[in-house]
Image (cartoon, helix red, strand yellow):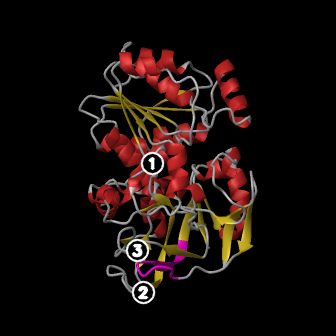
């Protein structure tokens, strides 16, 4: 089959690879009908994610049609149309039973590798390095889905792929980010990063009762989308000092809730931003935490900081004294996707949101290598790429 594969830093290729087979009786195989490039895929593309091996199949935002099921699969049948979450969860461990699906104890066969770096292993993830399971991803013609009774959600309506595909990751991720922010009536919410996750965090903040939403980015088309589709006030961090603007906009108190939808490859300004870039390239730190520092500084006393942006390891110069002395609450985590599938699908089916608004490019799988470069460079007004194998 044809698949997008990783061959090193900024080297993604379309290759012929073996078709997946049933390995465990709880597996299913789907024929992929739509798959997307996620912003976190760029961390792999740019060589920052440990545990990548040449030839790894990429992608963790897939959907398609079930063509084969293992002998113990009970909830899926051949012919079902499904969206597949990026988190792989067993459904029976303590974490899964408590709906903490991205912390599953049993789905990462390389748990020791992750535990060495993090202290404990999170769940396995589709197409996201051998440290997180070594599972082949969904930017391919076919995909093996482990624990098929726990992950995929069946789409029984005739909604197009483009409207439901993002249940695999970015819509639940944006929603959980807003939920983690503990938004209350009359709250002002600031969202750093207006990529797809940021856009869904903005939408979700309104759903959860925000009074104001302020979006922060530097890319004009992303800021425009945040205004037009998200009804957000905007700050262009290349033209304005973010702290000063937020203080002006909130009467000096700061936003009640701050969401870091950027993560490890944040673009900083000034000397600190240059130093982060240099240290990350020299592997002296794993992340560029410019946004994290800024959100900690800007958040009002007693406020909440939610971090859906992916961080990979060590971050220098975090102002933890500010966290403690300002009495901030911080909530983070890979998304517990399965928790949100049914309620968010219901919102789509009821017409409360059409997630396809973030799509700017729809191409074939063969165009994937070029689109990785375009997306990474933010060329051609690229915000979200959907591919059809």
- Answer few, some or many: residues within 10 Å of disc 2's Cα (few below 14, many 20 plus, some between 14 and 19): few
Q: Secondary structure at mark 2?
A: loop
Specify the quadrant that holds the C terminus.
Answer: bottom right
- Tell me if 54 is positioned left or right of 74 in this view: right
Q: Secondary structure at mark 3?
A: loop
Q: CA distance from mark 1 to mark 3?
A: 24 Å
Give percent across and percent down for residue 363. Answer: 64, 65
The front one of 229 and 71 is: 71
Residue at x-position 73% and y-position 68%? 14
Q: Earlier in the sequence, mark 1 or mark 3?
A: 1
Q: Residue furthest left?
A: 185
Looking at the image, do the residues carrying marks 3 and 2 touch, with CB atoms under 8 Å apart? no
* Residue 33 in the image: above or below residue 282: below
Q: Which residue is mark 3?
A: 148
* Residue 4 image-quadrant placement: bottom right
Marks 1, 3: nearer the viewer: 1
Q: Which residue is mark 1?
A: 120
Q: CA distance from mark 2 to mark 1?
A: 36 Å
Residue at x-position 27% and y-position 59%? 97
Q: Which residue is mark 2?
A: 78
Q: Which residues are magenta?
A: 22-33
- Tell me if 244 is positioned left or right of 95 in this view: right
Residue at x-position 64% and y-position 47%? 381
Residue at x-position 61% and y-position 71%? 140
Q: Is residue 253 magenta?
A: no
* Residue 256 in the image: above or below residue 130: above
The front one of 83 and 285 is: 285
Q: Earlier in the sequence, mark 3 or mark 2?
A: 2
Give percent across and percent down for residue 8. Answer: 75, 55
Marks 2, 1: nearer the viewer: 1
Looking at the image, can residue 385 be seen? no
């Amino acid at each position: 089959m044809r698949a997008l594969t990783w061959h090193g830093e900024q080297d993604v290729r379309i290759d012929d690879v073996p078709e997946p087979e049933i390995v465990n009786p709880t597996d299913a195989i789907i024929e992929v009908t739509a798959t997307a490039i996620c912003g976190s895929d760029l961390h792999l593309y740019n060589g920052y994610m440990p545990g990548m091996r040449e030839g790894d199949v990429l992608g963790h935002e897939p959907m398609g049609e079930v063509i084969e099921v293992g002998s113990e699969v009970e909830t899926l049948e051949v012919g079902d149309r499904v969206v597949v979450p990026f988190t792989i969860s067993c459904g029976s461990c303590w974490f899964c039973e408590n709906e903490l699906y991205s912390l599953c104890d049993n789905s990462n066969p390389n748990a020791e590798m992750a535990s060495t770096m993090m202290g404990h292993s999170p769940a396995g993830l589709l197409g996201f390095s051998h440290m997180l399971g070594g599972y082949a991803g969904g930017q391919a013609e076919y995909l093996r889905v482990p624990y098929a009774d726990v992950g995929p959600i069946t789409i029984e309506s005739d909604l197009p792929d483009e409207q439901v595909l993002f249940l695999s990751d970015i819509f639940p991720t944006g929603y959980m980010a807003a939920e983690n922010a503990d938004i209350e009536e009359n709250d002002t919410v600031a969202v750093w990063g207006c990529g797809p996750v940021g856009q869904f965090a903005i939408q979700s903040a309104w759903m959860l009762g925000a009074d104001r939403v302020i979006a922060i980015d530097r890319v004009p088309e992303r800021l425009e989308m945040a205004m037009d589709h998200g009804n957000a006030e905007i700050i262009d961090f290349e033209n304005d000092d973010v702290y000063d603007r937020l203080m002006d906009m909130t009467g000096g108190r700061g936003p009640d809730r701050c969401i870091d939808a950027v993560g490890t490859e944040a673009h900083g300004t000034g000397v600190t931003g240059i130093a982060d870039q240099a240290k990350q390239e020299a592997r002296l730190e794993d992340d560029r935490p410019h946004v994290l520092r800024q959100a900690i500084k800007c958040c009002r006393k007693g406020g909440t900081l939610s971090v859906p942006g992916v961080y990979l390891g060590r971050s220098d110069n975090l102002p933890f004294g500010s966290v403690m002395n300002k009495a901030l609450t911080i909530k983070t985590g890979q998304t517990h996707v399965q928790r949100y599938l049914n309620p968010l699908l219901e919102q789509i089916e009821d017409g409360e949101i059409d997630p396809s608004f973030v799509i700017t490019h729809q191409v074939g799988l063969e165009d994937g290598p070029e689109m990785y470069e375009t997306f990474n460079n933010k060329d051609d007004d690229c915000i979200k790429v959907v591919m059809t194998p």
